[in-house]
Image (cartoon, rainbow, N blue to C red):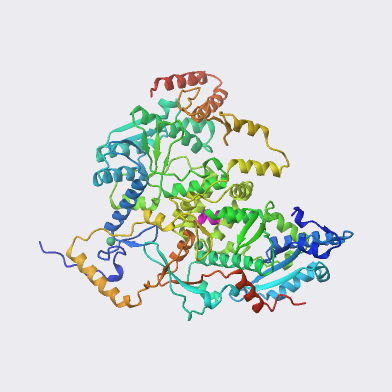
Amino acid sequence: MSEEKFKVKYGKNLEDIKAKTPTVLLPVSFGESSLVLLDIIVSQLEEQSAMNRAHIGYKLVVVIIDESDFDNTKIDIKDHVQKLKEVSGTDLLDKLDIKFKIIKSESYVTSNRLQKIFLTHDFQSFSGKSESDLDLDLKTILLQTSDKSTREDLLNIVRKETILRTAIAENCSVILFGHSMSKLADDVLSLAVKGRGSEISDNLTDGIIEYERSNLHILHPLRDILFSEIKEYSKLCGLSEISLNISEGTTVKKSIKNKTINELIKDYFRSVEVEYPEVISTVVKIGSKMAHPPTQDDFQIKNCILCSNSIYNDPKHWLEQITVHGGAPLELEEEKANLEAYLASVKDKKSDSLIHEADEVVPLCYGCIVNLGTTGQSGFIWPTKRPSKQEILDEYVLTDDEGDED
Amino acid sequence: MPEPTKKPVKVSQLCELCHSRKAVMKRPKNLQKLCKQCFFHVFETEIHLTIQKEQLFYKGERVAIGASGGKDSTVLASILKTLNERYNYGLELVLLSIDEGIVGYRDDSLATVKRNQKQYEMPLEIVSYRDLYNWTMDEIVACSGIKSSCTYCGVLRRQALDRGALKLGIHHVVTGHNADDMAETVLMNLLRGDTARLENSVNVTTKSSGSPIKRSKPFKYTYQKEIVLYAHYKKLDYFSTECTYAPEAFRGTARVLLKNLESIRPSCILDIIHSGEHFKLKERKKRDLAKNRKAGKGRNTATSAAANSNKEVEVRPDGSVSLHSRDGNRCERCGYLSMNRVCKACILIEGLELSRAKVAIEGDTSVNGAAKLTKTLEQLSF
Ligand SMILES: [Zn+2]
Ligand SMILES: [Zn+2]
């Protein structure tokens, strides 16, 4: 945050200054880290605004994703945003021209973009024709799988995309993530465990990414700070009272079987960091040294239809090599009879044969193939098409009636 | 004899692959319900596919199987014999065992290997730490403590296998490292920040430059639990006691994590290997430059000087120094091929000799030991 573009601007030509002032998006989850980052930024902007003849260095947009439609907590986000504003000082926020946006996660799902995705036994992925009668909300979509880790992974995709889309809609060129070093270490290990190792570099790098032909500058200002330190800071500043501790502390009571991959990894770090305090910074350091993997055999990099991440090598090919899907030959008469009985039993069900001729082969990354493997075989419905910049802007204007209160 | 009247198998109980025999097991890798025959079929075929894809062997190759008597290497010996015959690999297979000198553990497991020798009709060669290094693992643990036993053993065993193979004139050693081991290694590399190993630790075949020995892991994608099941159904004779010396505590934590993860997502072992195969580090120069920029320094002159000269000096994470040259270097102490001036085994042994010298006030065994080591190593020809 010490870069030139965030510093105060001088001059009399307001148009000129406006052009030089970037708009910065800060997603606030009401966890301690993002609250602390907001607190620090408000202080920085306050300092900047107090300087003589200077204009503040950047314009801040705070985005809060409202998941109350499907999480069980039934939290009133509006209420919480109001509390947050009071803690930060409503007048100050106004003076600094800080905008608060509440986006419902539901906005990620609009019925016209829903598509059914199928995975065959030999790991080929198809999409069904866009079925106009599909009309599901996000909760129903996530409930298509009973696997908690898959739901969590899908929800992370929704969150990330929602943030990126908001950045485009709000004309932001910078996104600040409040992730602590501890959270980043969790992410590195979780991605590795989910077969998403190739995504680690994108998740950790501070730098420019391209989204719908716009450049977005991603920064993690708290990347060198342990979560335990952030917690202390938030206590001192009285921020703990408004934090929602989204997943903190609740996992201890659960049995291992009921935990998700992320929860297990979080527990792991919290327990080993006591005896091996360097492990968190070590993991973040090595994660930050990673680059995109090379492709093999002239494989064309594609984007996953489900999570939009880059696919560098054909996961179908990889899986086929290591998981044989054919049985041993039949030998006895009774085995043949059993097979007949089996074929007769599936014949009745064949009518709803899932792979239609018109279906299209779609790219699915390894991590999403694993996700789909947890969902049964009748196909998985997902909003597959990423909207264009214009569509984002159009949709945004229509649905945005909550953000600009007061 | 009249056939016993069997109840027909219900369709819902049939194997998910052949749909004709009763399923008897859930496959650990993907929880598919399979019959015994289909399990053998997929288990063996998958290993064959790995061997083919990696072009692991050539016809007429002599291959040493690192045999410990444990389940992994016993199944490896059995399955290589099976596949060698079925697909006509044309391999000459030899069992190669290391006697680490762990009383109560190794004695029994070596007895198993000796039975395997007969069962699989393969020649057996045993190389001992005592002969090679003049140290047994029991002595090493007594001297350096139990904490780092795996580090010692890993380094010493690696070299012992190489030396044993060379003694037999063999240049290819296969080991029973399985998918669980690979996944654990991937996690450990991340947790230790081991950039030197990050990119290549999941390779099926490794060959350090300068070493005459190729090492392969045909079980790279094979689940440990499936190896156990295969040994069980095939009634293979193996020794199931774990090594007396438990792994170091930190590795233990990663192992527990992996077990927990596998219990909620069985595919995670393969998923982690998939990730490991996609790890790529940024170009070193870029990383260094970035680092220098951050520290506010200019280009590090020492690095650039080293980069310009042909003899780039690299300091390894373990503190040893490597000299990159095309021909394999030899360890100054033992003459064994080594990337470093002094090979890792000699560094460890030397450390041990020093502490033994301190411990043994009377009885001049330290000098004796070092001298004997040099002498023994000199005698081994390759
Ligand atoms: Zn994906
Ligand atoms: Zn079967």
Question: Residue A115's spot in the image, x, y percent?
Answer: 48, 73
Left or right placement of residue B150 versus residue A334 in this view: right
Which quadrant holds residue B216? top left
Q: Quick check: can you spot residue A270?
A: no
Q: Quadrant of ligand 2?
A: bottom left
In the picture as drawn, the residue positioned furthest to the left comes out as B1
Question: Residue B238's spot in the image, x, y percent?
Answer: 33, 44
The stretch drawn in magenta includes residue A194 = yes
Look at the picture and state if B287 lies above or below B331: below
Q: Quick check: can you spot residue B112?
A: yes
Say which residue appears at 54% left-offset and 40% top-offset.
Answer: B196
Left or right placement of residue B49 versus residue A69 in this view: left
Say which residue appears at 48% left-offset and 34% top-offset.
Answer: B155
Look at the picture and state if B165 lies above or below B19: above
Range drawn in magenta: A189-197
**Which residue is more in the foreground, A81 or B279?**
B279
Left or right placement of residue B362 versus residue B105 in this view: right
